[in-house]
Image (cartoon, grey):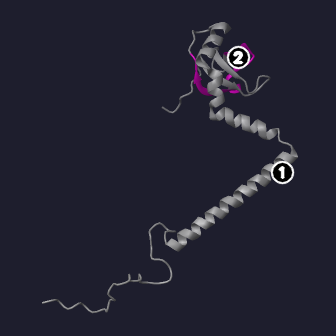
Amino acid sequence: MPFQRFVETGRIAVVSDGPNKGKLVSIVDVIDQTRVLVDGPNSNVPRGQIRLNQLHLTKFRIKFPFTASTRVVRKAWNDAKVDEKWSESVWAKKVAAKDKRIQLSDFDRFKLRRARSRRNKIRSLAFFNLKKAASRDGTLYGKKKMAKGGDKPKPKKGAQKPTGKAPKPKK
């Protein structure tokens, strides 16, 4: 199924335009193909109509009767803990991070740039150290290979030296 967010009664949406931009609302009724009746009891959005192209639908949905009053919508909203679920969502965290970034001063942006630079230097140093160790071990490209410096493995102490001739069979 390609679509999972439908324009339906109880769907929670984010207002993308107008005086209530960024606030959560619930769709109470579908007026026609382009407009819906919305109510935002906890976000101080008055009950009224809004165009669908001014809404971003979320994955959250609450259950209440068709064209329910604001009191009923508020009760369903609080019972479903929509505000808590929204604040834990990735979408809300991205919006909060964006707002925080906008609030940064020049000095804050400078400090952030310096911290990123330091982090990247530490990360690069660790990466190159691991790469050098893997190159020495011969595991840089996946399979364990012979260590550099010799084509043949060194014999263990006490082992017989290979002469290149086949051993004589014992009688």
Location of residue 123 (image quadrant) = bottom right
Name the residue nearer the viewer: 65 or 159.
Answer: 159
Along the viewing direction, whichever of 88 and 73 lies nearer the viewer? 88
Q: Position of residue 124 (x, y in %)?
A: 66, 62
Asked if the stretch drawn in magenta spans residue 43, the answer is yes
Residue under numbered circle 2: 42
**Above-or-below relation of 92 to 83:** below
Q: Amino acid at mark 1?
A: Phe
Residue found at the very far right of the displayed protein:
106
- Please give the name of the residue rendered at 77% of the width and 22% of the height, measured from the top-left corner: 20
Q: Would you say 159 lies left or right of 24 here?
A: left
Looking at this view, name the residue that lies furthest to the left.
171
Whole-percent x and y of residue 107? 87, 47
Left or right of 162: which side holds 39? right
Whether residue 44 appears in magenta in the rendering, the answer is yes
Q: State the residue at coordinates (69%, 37%).
A: 94
Alpha carbon of mark 1 to alpha carbon of mark 2: how far? 38 Å
Q: Give the x, y percent position of residue 52.
A: 67, 23
Q: Quadrant of residue 29?
A: top right
Relative to 134, say whether 41 is above or below: above
Tell me the amino acid under the disc marked 2.
Answer: Asn
Front: mark 1 or 2: 1
Nearer-N-terminus badge (1/2)? 2
- The residue at 83%/51% (across/down) is 110
The residue singled out by tag 1 in the image is 110
- For the record, the magenta segment spans 37-62
Query: In the rendered structure, are the residues bearing label 1 and label 2 in contact, judged by CB atoms less than 8 Å apart?
Result: no
